[in-house]
Amino acid sequence: MQARVLIAAGSDSGGGAGIQADVKTVTALGGYAATALTAVTAQDTLGVHGVVGLEPEFVALQLRLVLADLGADCVKTGMLHSAGILRAVADALSRHAPGLPVVVDPVMLAKGGAALIADEALAVLRAELVPAAAVLTPNLPEAERLLGLAPGALDSPAALPEAARALRGLGPRAVLLKGGHLAGARLVDVLAWEGGLEVFEDERVDTRHTHGTGCTLASAVACGLAQGMELVPAVRRARAYVRACILHAPGLGRGHGPLGHGWTCSWPG
């Protein structure tokens, strides 16, 4: 059976991030993507211009119906927008998907800096969803907020291992801390899990076409887990996929452009 990934996230009208990026990623990597939409955004490569959240009960209904009929091998969460939606998702997964691995991408800010989660939802995220995560995938600003650190506190690659361990202390079984916000020619990510700690390092690709990299990475990890891969190989493949997506970006938009998610696919002629 094709590996199934159920994604709870918001939409991106520009197609570069959110549920659009999630579905493209899972499909390109050979999985089957089902969705529970949490919010609708009006955005382009220049920024987010509006957000409308769905009713929490309707978000939970989507999750329940998909799990009862199509089923899932892994769940991935992205933008959850409000405390009510966060509680609804956490409760639905606890009731209807016990034991399923959940990849939690704690989406808080868009690439251009716009807030994608209400302030009061942060405490709910920390208390109810982060501890249920098989893998937590924050970037540095998200990690700082989850840990209660000042903005910019995580300002060097040397700070990442300790921060990843501290994030594991919030309850997730593994943390993939993404260092893309750091300056420099090298890109450093840190994975902390019960087996220890691994640092991944690559040469940074000099491009503005990086919109949706976080969503894409988390969905690629989720697809790997759904396909039965062990954590570290799933992370390695996910990082390689994202890098190739950046290199194959279509060059669209005037701002932070979308990735080339379909580079794995080919059509005769």
Image (cartoon, helix red, strand yellow):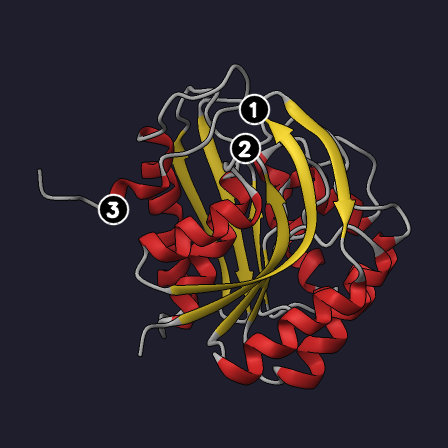
Camera sees residue 132: no
Which residue is disc 2 drawn over?
Answer: 14
Q: Earlier in the sequence, mark 2 or mark 3?
A: 2
Q: Is residue 222 visible?
A: yes
Quick one: which residue is furthest to the top in this view?
Answer: 254
Residue 91: percent from left, percent from top: 76, 76
Q: In x, y percent, where is residue 173? A: 60, 70
Q: Amino acid at mark 2?
A: Gly
Q: Position of residue 147 (x, y in %)?
A: 79, 50
Tag in front: 2 or 1:
2
Count of picture labels? 3
Callout 3: SS: helix
Q: Earlier in the sequence, mark 2 or mark 1?
A: 2
Q: Position of residue 75 (x, y in %)?
A: 55, 68
* Residue for badge 1: 45
Q: Quick check: 140 above or below 74?
A: above
Q: Amino acid at mark 1?
A: Thr
**Towards the viewer: 35 or 201:** 35
Question: Which residue is at a point 37% across and 72% down the rendered structure image?
Answer: 3
> For mark 2, does the 10 Å Cα neighbourhood hold few (<14), some (14 to 19), or many (20 or more) residues?
many
User: Where the N terminus falls, by quadrant?
Assistant: bottom left
Q: Real-space Cα distance between discs 2 and 3? A: 21 Å
Q: Secondary structure at mark 2?
A: loop
